[in-house]
Amino acid sequence: MIKIKKAIAFFAQKKGLSKDGFFLNDLVKFLGELTETDYVIIDVFKRNNPLVAKTIAIYAKGDIIPNFEYELKCTPCENVMGKSLCVYKKNIQRLFPKDKLLEDMNVESYIGIPLWDSLGQAIGLIAIMHSKPINDSETLELILQIAANTTSQEIEKLEIEKIVQRRTKELKIKNKQFENELKERKLADEALRESEEKYRLLFDRMPDGVYKSTDEGKFINVNTAMFKMLGYDSKEELLAIDIKTQLYFEISDRESVALKENSKELGIYRMKKKDGSEIWGEDHGWLNYDKTKNVLYHEGIIRDVSDRKKTELELIIAKEKAERNATELNEQKILFESMFNTISDGVVITNINREIIVANNGMKNTFGYEPKELIGKSTQILYDSDNSFNDTGENVFNKKNKKKENTYITYYKNKKNKIFPGETFGAKLYNNDGEWIGNIGIIRDISDRQKMTEDLIITKQTYLDVFNTVSEAIYVQDETGTFIDINKGAENMYGYTRKELIGKNPLLVSAPGLNNIDEVQKKSAKVFKSGISERFDFWAVRKNGEIFPKDVIINKGRYFGKDALITTARDVTLIKRTEQELIIAKEKAQESDRLKSAFLANMSHEIRTPMNGILGFSDLLKTPNLSGEKQQRYIEVIEKSGKRMLNIINDIIDISKIEAGLMNIEIKESNVNEQIEYIYTFFKPEVEAKGMQLYFKNTLPAKEAIIKTDREKLFAILKNLVKNAIKYAKEGSIEFGYVLKMGSESVDEIQNNELEFFVKDTGIGIPKDRQEAIFERFIQSDIIDTMARQGAGLGLSITKAYIEVLGGKIWVESEEGIGSTFYFTLPYNHELKEKNSTKDNEVTDNTENRIKNLKILIAEDDEASEMLLSLHLSDFCNEIIKARTGLEAIEACRNNPDLNLILMDIQMPDLNGYEATRQIRQFNKDVVIIAQTAYGLYGDREKYLDAGCNDYISKPIKKDHLAALIQKHFKK
Ligand code: ADP
């Protein structure tokens, strides 16, 4: 009770409560001491977390300790707070095992009471805890109830005080803030005023235009830069304009400006100046709105960016241009590349060292190299030789070479080492600064072209060769006949050059007055029109005036793609002449045929007459008991006839030799004087027997009268002529001789000097028209002249042939009934040297005397001939052996090794003379063999000599001739 009283007294005393809040500490201390418990605590809820309690006063075992907070969960306080009085007299820890605080404080017992505020809200608790069980809990409960009331009030009061204090503090802060704001506003006002001034200055002095305008399109304010920029004189002037129509070119422009301003974006717009010109402004503008989001006005800054814009536009144009150029360049590059590679010719680009940098696909066609194979290689590999490479260097690609380009043909070598001719365009390449940077070569294989050109040249040459080789004249003429081209044959034919004839009319080569030119022209025109050839004769004239006939054929043809007349003309002079000659020859042949018949008849007569004599008188000789005188007369007749016949046969043989071209001449030195004298001596008796005179005339001294000629033939000539003179004269005289005719001044210069011989008679003469004919063969026979009937008519023709072969000529001067003089010449080829002309005769005489003892074999099958030979040889031998055949002759020769001479007949049975001689020569080389032959033709001599004969003699054999031969071979 006491305790209760003490409690009441305490709370009464402390009724007014403490103002400093320490009362609660006093309270817990009082309660602790009063209740004699270890711990007294007063808790309140944590304002913002009702699960956590916060002590506001703690009494622990006599002391006030610092406050703390703790979790209400699983504590005895949880059951108290906001609820009701709880009393745990003992074992409290066992009841709340999770309450660590109880354990820490070593509490055994617990009494707690909740605290409520004046409004009945739970605000906290008061609890007492003791380390021993509580026995008197009722008193303690009472005390706590008394304390709770006062404590609640106290806590409430403390809370209110706290709020008041907080409020006051807040007010003070607010007040302070307010004062500061006031101060700041004052400063701000000041600054505003200042900045407004600055703004105004800035506004007016800004280089950019500043504006403020209404949404409807009126400027409210603009700065100086603005109106000047737009070309206005004053601010007012600009304020007066209608923005939509006067500031912009298009109304839509303003709308796009507004759109940008709305999004506060920077834009560049085209605007119209006062004078209507264009200005580009960079507008940094924005819109101002009222509270209802209506546009109040536009504001912004405009910078004149016309220059920039212009530059930009220019840049754009430049860029577009550049892009265009780039595109073009690219296109050009593509074009170039495709072109470069499409070229079938080989193209290489090199550096200045002639190493390949680029090669096209054409290099594959031309050289067989892939372009990439060539890169980095020297162009040397493309040439057939180092010389070609160096030459082209000299010509184009070397540093020293000043020529920038050149086209040339050189020889190249492809990948397979085949050499081919290439036509090359080579050029040096220079950069923009004029520096030499490399070379380009474009190479074309011209093998085909070259071959074609060669073929063409050959074809052309062949054509020209053919054209010019033809001996006929060929000329090409146009429709009017004008010469377009002519060949060599035409040049030769007319004597004009090609140049002289081309372009000329054929009248130039027409013999004046001999051709019907109109007719010829008509023919030409006809050929040109119809294409049908024409042929006619034409009299042409050469440049030298010579006129000649020609045979002309005009054809139509083509000349280098044009219609033309192709005319061939042949000089027919020769043909015409030949025609004439043929006619003459024919007449002549007919004549000779006639003559030959006459000749044969005459010949028959001439041979039969002496034959008649010979045979007839031979027959008479057989008459028995014929007187010696008669015998002698008959034999004379036979001899005369034989001689006459021999003459005829000799003449026939001579003429045959001449006809056959087998005349044999033997040139020796011959004394003309001697020959003349001999003839004189020979014929003198015959002439004088006719009662006529014979004279001779030697005009040169003996030593100058020696010429080189055929002695026998000269003798025959003179003999013939003198014989004829005797034959054709009955009376008067015959004179013959020679004179020297000088071709040059001096006798020593024998050139062209000749001896002119003459045989002059006072005979019957020769009619003029026969004077030439008498030299022709067989001519005598058709002369109806009894005197002329003695002879074959061959003498003069043989004479003429002899004279001609000795280098002279013959002619006659004659008058019928008066006489004839035959002349002939011989070259006077005398050499000045002493000659002993009599030596031969002397030797002959001496030798003849000595040759007497020869042993001779006569090989002859004909008995008469053998007999004759035996008689002729009787003077020279002491023994004659006879053989009838070739074999016998060989045999005889073998048996008589001492034989000196064999007279070998050629025509023998068994073995002929040639073969017999050949065999004899095999064992006897020394015996002299003389062939005897009846042929006497030229060429036989060689045959005999070849067979091994030493000489030959013609039948009939004359004693003199035989003697001369024996002398020749046996003189010692
Ligand atoms: P041949 O005398 O044998 O008849 P030639 O040939 O010697 O033959 O002569 C040819 C002809 O020329 C003779 O027939 C004769 O008519 C004529 N003739 C030759 N010589 C004379 C001459 N001296 N005087 C006249 N006529 C001659």
Image (tube, grey):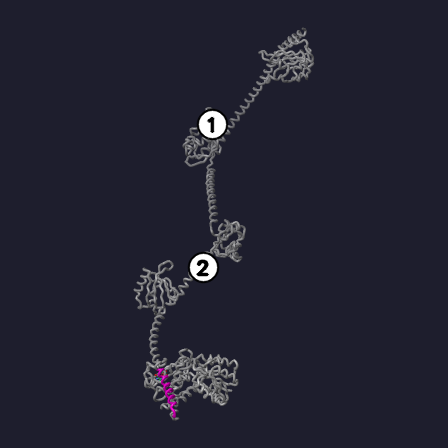
The image quadrant of residue 592 is bottom left
Residue 137 in view in this figure: yes
Range covered by the magenta-colored residues: 602-625
Query: Which image quadrant: the N terminus?
Result: top right
Q: Quadrant of ligand 1?
A: bottom left
| Up-down relation of residue 876 to residue 192 (above or below) | below
Query: Any magenta on residue 621?
Result: yes
Query: Any magenta on residue 4?
Result: no
Which numbered disc flags the more N-terminal residue, 2 or 1? 1
Residue 917, position as x, y percentages in the image: 49, 81
Q: Residues within 10 Å of mark 2 (few under 14, many from 20)?
A: few
Residue 280, position as x, y percentages in the image: 45, 36
- In this view, the residue in front, 815 or 968, is 968
Under mark 1, the amino acid is Asn
Say what secondary structure mark 1 lies in. Answer: strand
- In this view, the residue in front, 556 or 79, is 556
**Foreground tag (2 vs 1):** 2
Q: Do labels 2 and 1 touch, CB within 8 Å? A: no
Residue 288: mark in rendering: 1
**Magenta region, mostly helix, strand or loop?**
helix
- In this view, the residue in front, 189 or 698, is 698
Under mark 2, the amino acid is Glu
Say what secondary structure mark 2 lies in. Answer: helix
- In this view, the residue in front, 885 or 835, is 885
- The residue tagged 2 is 454
Residue 435 in view in this figure: no
The image quadrant of residue 270 is top left
Residue 105: mark in rendering: none
Query: Seen from this angle, which residue lies furthest front?
Result: 624
Count all numbered tags in the image, as a single digit.
Answer: 2
